[in-house]
Amino acid sequence: MRPRARKGVTSGKGEKGKSREIRGSCASRLSRTSRQSRAAYMMPDYRHILLIKPSSLGDIVHAMPTCAAIRRAYPKARLTWLVKQQWAGLVERIDGVDRVWPVKSTLKGWLSQVSPLRAERFDLVVDLQGLFRSAAIGSLSGSPLLVGFANGREGSPWFYSKRVPVPQSEMHAVDRYLLVAKAVGAMESGAPEFRFRIPQTDYEEVDRLLSQAGVTPGMSWAAMNVSARWPTKRWPAASFAETADRLRQEGYGAVVMIGGPDERADVAAVSGMMKTPPIDLAGATTVGLLPALLSRASVLITNDSGPMHVAAAMGIPVVALFGPTSAVRTGPYGVGHDVLTGKVPCSPCFSRTCHNTVPLECLKLVSPQQVLAAVRAQRSLRAVPR
């Protein structure tokens, strides 16, 4: 079958038209190859990179794929991550980070880092925080290139030498951060990567704590995170208590309460309402041990909070309760998770104070029965051979 003549290209007995078409195709390929070669040649070879993402726990986890993409694009570079001291233990366990730069939360703590940072002579600074303080410290580092979001808050874009536009507000934080990675030549290939390097000693410490509490290796157990920084993010304590009791009654296994030292009161409130006391590990582990601890859980039932993102990054199924915040922007990333929220007109309001006629209606509309159904579904899926 003879090829159909292309519009604008002569075709006939001779080969003139065909040769013209072949030459055009080759020229196009050569031009494309030349452009790619020039782009590769012109791509900067960054050797000392500073990533600024000081807080909070969930936001740090969201930045992990950006860190992985930058590391893959510049494998020979020394990558330093500036983070608040309280989260340094987690960043120490993120693969691809060469140095953790902890900073105190006070203004004096930040200013004290200016001279040491300038001495490092960074050739690229990436600010994923997008606030005045993070942008200012990036500028004061003396780096010739400071990259951040064009829609950063508190005047932060004024400091940036390269501003990255965000095409839409309704996109997940992970994908938004990856826009910055792309802007510095770190193209994401495939699914975003959350890579921890967890030392064996972390697993040993976690197993010791669980064993002391009666959870033996291989036993199924549910982690439960009942607290959150915002009062408006907290599912009612009575609902958590009922869910935990029902899990025990259905033979799911142990219920292990997790959280930091300042969340013990919230855990105690739930535990006091339960018929069977849970295993309470709130305040018993450091933030650095959280990935190893959650890796042993079968499921995490949680408010919108930092541990939710750590569990999702570890591939642990999450059943999350959302009220004033948007799961589209900050929900558990990836597949295999359930987000439950009550449908009310004012949600998401992104407010730390509820102004609805029925206080926290967006959370109260979610019943323990719905959460239990989601947990059962997760359990059923995990039981299916893959």
Image (cartoon, rainbow, N blue to C red):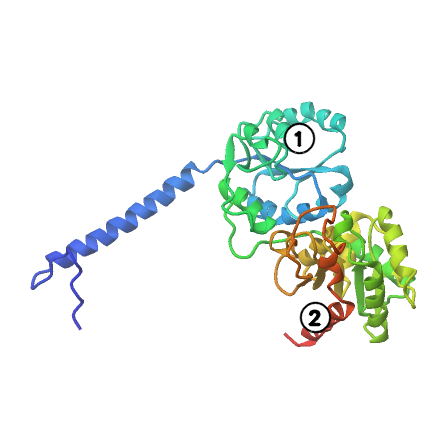
Amino acid type shown at disc 2? Gln
Q: Quadrant of the C terminus?
A: bottom right
Looking at this view, is 247 or 184 the one in front?
247
Instruction: Examine the image and state in which quarter residue 210 appears.
Output: bottom right
Residue 101 horizontal/vertical position (percent): 71, 35
In the picture, measured across the screen, residue 27 lies left or right of residue 255, that is: left
Looking at this view, is 341 or 27 the one in front?
341
Check disc 1 and report the residue beneath it.
133
- Note whether 371 is above or below 324 in the view shown: below
- Note whether 361 is above or below 119 in the view shown: below
**How would you rate the neighbour count of disc 2 (Cα within 10 Å): few for under 14, some for 14-19, many for 20 or more?**
some
Check disc 2 and report the residue beneath it.
378
**How would you rate the neighbour count of disc 1 (Cα within 10 Å): few for under 14, some for 14-19, many for 20 or more?**
some
In the picture, measured across the screen, residue 218 lies left or right of residue 192, that is: right
| Inter-mark Cα distance, 2 to 1 | 42 Å
Q: Identify the secondary structure beneath mark 2.
A: helix
Residue 234 horizontal/vertical position (percent): 78, 54
Q: Identify the secondary structure beneath mark 1.
A: helix
Residue at 76% from the left image edge and 47% from the top image edge: 230
Residue 216 horizontal/vertical position (percent): 86, 67
In the picture, measured across the screen, residue 288 lies left or right of residue 215, that is: left
Looking at this view, is 230 or 317 the one in front?
230
- Would you say residue 72 is visible in this rendering? no
- Would you say residue 14 is visible in this rendering? yes
Question: Which numbered disc, 2 or 1, marks the residue that appears first in the sequence?
Answer: 1
Q: Which mark is residue 92?
A: none
In the picture, measured across the screen, residue 83 lies left or right of residue 10, that is: right
Looking at this view, is 328 or 101 the one in front?
328
Q: Quadrant of the N terminus?
A: bottom left
Amino acid type shown at disc 1? Arg
Residue 82 horizontal/vertical position (percent): 68, 36
